[in-house]
Image: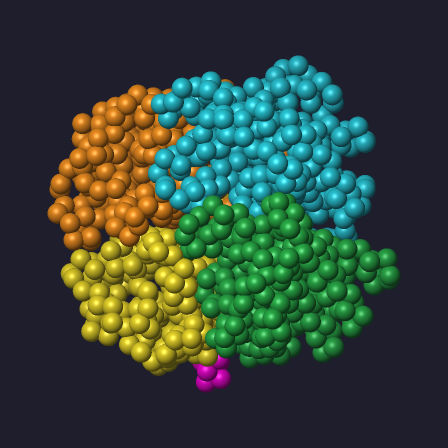
Chain colours: A green, B yellow, C orange, D cyan
Amino acid sequence: MTNKASLLRRVAAELIGTAGLLVVVIGSGIQAANLSRDTGVALVANSLASAIGLGLIITLFGPLSGAHLNPVVTLTAWWARRTGGEGLDTREAFAYAAAQTTGAIGGAVLAETMFGRTPGTFSTQVRDGGHLLIGEIVATAGLVLVIQGLGRIGRPRLVPAAVAAYIAAAIWFTSSGSFANPAGTIGRAFSDSFTGIAPQSLPGFVAAQLLGGVLGLALAALLYGREPREGGTTAPRSGQPETEAAVADIPRTGSAFEAIV
Amino acid sequence: MTNKASLLRRVAAELIGTAGLLVVVIGSGIQAANLSRDTGVALVANSLASAIGLGLIITLFGPLSGAHLNPVVTLTAWWARRTGGEGLDTREAFAYAAAQTTGAIGGAVLAETMFGRTPGTFSTQVRDGGHLLIGEIVATAGLVLVIQGLGRIGRPRLVPAAVAAYIAAAIWFTSSGSFANPAGTIGRAFSDSFTGIAPQSLPGFVAAQLLGGVLGLALAALLYGREPREGGTTAPRSGQPETEAAVADIPRTGSAFEAIV
Amino acid sequence: MTNKASLLRRVAAELIGTAGLLVVVIGSGIQAANLSRDTGVALVANSLASAIGLGLIITLFGPLSGAHLNPVVTLTAWWARRTGGEGLDTREAFAYAAAQTTGAIGGAVLAETMFGRTPGTFSTQVRDGGHLLIGEIVATAGLVLVIQGLGRIGRPRLVPAAVAAYIAAAIWFTSSGSFANPAGTIGRAFSDSFTGIAPQSLPGFVAAQLLGGVLGLALAALLYGREPREGGTTAPRSGQPETEAAVADIPRTGSAFEAIV
Amino acid sequence: MTNKASLLRRVAAELIGTAGLLVVVIGSGIQAANLSRDTGVALVANSLASAIGLGLIITLFGPLSGAHLNPVVTLTAWWARRTGGEGLDTREAFAYAAAQTTGAIGGAVLAETMFGRTPGTFSTQVRDGGHLLIGEIVATAGLVLVIQGLGRIGRPRLVPAAVAAYIAAAIWFTSSGSFANPAGTIGRAFSDSFTGIAPQSLPGFVAAQLLGGVLGLALAALLYGREPREGGTTAPRSGQPETEAAVADIPRTGSAFEAIV
């Protein structure tokens, strides 16, 4: 189930999926900034396109690898396993994070190429200031809470749509623009464009994202209790099978998908 | 079911949920006003982000506390119990409203902090004029009608998406910008920004919201009849279990969720 | 089932529902035109708010009256009955259309009042030119095709979301702005604002809408065949119960809802 | 099942459906460019309207013909049959492509007429440069991957919504504006407007789209394996019937719909 071949395939999915995500984020940012004279309009387009792309990639790649696309999400899966649940072991988590980071850089290069720009140029957009780091903490804590919460209330199939919607909103309500993804943040350093981030701002953003991830796990434990029962519900349900609208098959981040590949 | 511990937990959920809502509303308002030179563009972004945030919070916090996030909604639950249905007793309703108001102020402070502003500054944006109060009455009556109506036609699972969609539209179609939430209105007084409201305009807005809530209940009774049957349907159904797409588990505002915690 | 009392109630629902629709359309138009200096931005906000309002009203009022909200839709229900299906008789159709028109005017007056304007002022916005009438024909034909088509393929529960989405798009892709509703068009004549229409342009628009309605019925007959089978499907299905996501209960416009009230 | 009469009907559906799509794309482009002074705003409106129109047409025409609306999609269905699955034979594929192209040109002419312009004028908007062709390859590969992927993971009912969402995003994240449809591209050559393309740019775009289609099929094979099992799943499922929210009935592009007409 977690033999070498299947890990390879899952890692390929993480790499291609994260590359696709960065193509969408950076590409739509370049297009939007080119077309509009108003930064608000550009961010409306960029945030909607990014959210849609994220939702579709989670839907399509979820059954392959869990569609983490984000080292923070992979870390929560690693933590889930360490604390006795299903998830990723240390080796798998490293492989995922490496694939995500590699994919993100590749996606940035493809986006730059597709727009006739010089790939490999570093971003010059410095994103500094403690309040931006608070923004990244809030953004990542919220992301983890959405994913964990949907698992705890037994509605993991809403994850793709909910994560997409969350990111569309968080880009606006956080001061930092809600990168909320260390791999994505590194990838964005490779594009001197609307959605880029200067390499010197990377350490602060990544540290804030990791801190936000821990805060999100703590908040989920506070609200829903520490031990999710088998099946992901914390509350008695009326016994009828859940037939609700669902947007994807992800039963819980980094858990059931291991059985698939 | 309504022991002290569970009330405490529900109240915590109302506090954190309402804080999150205000972070989204105020934060996205600050960001949008900063980025766009066009107030229309700013409100497009602010209304979409606010609606998404509201929908996600109702989805995630509904199974914990009913996700009222709004004293008017809590009042309708209190009224439902007084008239013989399920709902909140007076003590619970006070606790909910206090938690919502506290959370709203806390969320405003966090939003201000996240954007590097001075928290605790009162809004200077006066919102006066009788026509704005008509706007708040319409906005709140509509909100209550949406929630009550979905319960009466047996489709309470649509509440999170429908309430989110309603607010996105009502921000535009009402003259007042559809605050429609006394706790949220008080929270907004603590931010001198795009979505703020000067303290002196609070009494009128809150009074209009309460009046709108009563009007919404009356309208629901007029349209759907006074006594919703058990199960929330007013019409014979074909007997098949409802398997429709649903966005959350809320069976009826302030009712079934009490049984969960 | 069609006794006087129930017709009264259905007519009340049509009146209130259409009034609500006009409040949303005209109100959001006034707000958008006030806030933005760019007509494109104003129409983005106005079209999204109108579509959301329409979808919510169809969802909430569908189980009461079928939520026609539009004399053209009522005419298709009258035609369905004349040709041997379920629908409205002539007296009911007249009552529906009168209620829709009265409600539309009332909604316009409420919107004007809510924005502190003088209600009862006629629009001065002349909408002339044969190409606009082609636009109205296309808009209304498409609307009828969407409603009829969903019934024919056995997916009537998608009607509220699909009609809302259709209108959001048709406002953009038709030259006339897709009024597509004689009652709504008359109501808009009572508001000298962004979404208004001068009384002198009414006859052409209404005629084009009626023609579009006929064209839509013809197109549906051409594509799906003339005789929809019981259950609304034209194709063999795999036997599993339909458990798809559905957005409302409307089984077919102007049919099953008669049995409800 | 594939007798002359049914092919005729399917071909009519492809023709009318593709005409409708072009009316939406070109019409909303003309309207948006007329109303907004900001190209970004115009593309926001044009991309949302086009996506909604596409999703509705796939929903309504899917049960009739599969709603390919696009020769690249038809080619993937032809390829599926050649490799032993269900799909279209060569004669059917040619008929589909011809109908799509004819419909696209007709839709362009209708859009021009509806906006009071001179139909039959060729576009003068040259879209040249190798990076735009990379954009078209990416856009079309992604489109094919979305359709194939949803089939492979057993969620074909998401196709209409997912394809609509994909196009809304791809218009932004690709440098070319994501035409991704040879018939649609030819139709756009017949409108000298916002969404047009000069005839001299056609060959490059169409070639890139075909190449992208092949790349999409290869990517799907790489990620999901070469042989989709009957039922479209590549992974063991938990045995419960799929009751998820679904937006349409399309079981797999160009497969099960053949049995319907």
Q: Which residue appears at 75% of the width and 65% of the height?
A: A98
Residue drawn at the location 58% of the way across and 54% of the way down? A25
Question: Where is residue B6 drawn, in percent x and y?
Answer: 48, 80
Which residue is located at x 68 percent, y 30 percent?
D207
Q: Is residue B3 magenta?
A: yes
Q: Which quadrant holds the N terminus of chain A?
A: bottom right
Residue C198 shows up from this direction: yes
Given residues D156 and D238, the one toward you in this image is D156
Q: Residue furthest bottom?
A: B4
Where does the magenta region start and end? Answer: B1-10
Q: In which quarter of the image is the C terminus of chain A?
A: bottom right
Locate residue D229: give its quadrant.
Answer: top right
In screen coordinates, is D117 left or right of B251? left
Q: Which of C33 and A236 is in front in this view?
A: C33
Question: In which image quadrant can residue C254 be found?
Answer: top left
Q: Position of residue C80 (x, y in %)?
A: 40, 26
Asked if the stretch drawn in magenta spans residue C79, the answer is no
In this orientation, does residue C155 appear?
no
Query: Which residue of the protein is positioned furthest toward the right in this rendering?
Result: A4
Magenta highlight: main SS = helix
Q: Which residue is drawn at 18% across and 27% down?
A: C200
Res C142 quadrant in image: top left
In front of the other: D56 or B33: B33
Q: Where is residue D23 in the image (x, y as percent from the top left)?
A: 46, 28
Q: Where is residue D151 in the image (x, y as percent from the top left)?
A: 69, 42
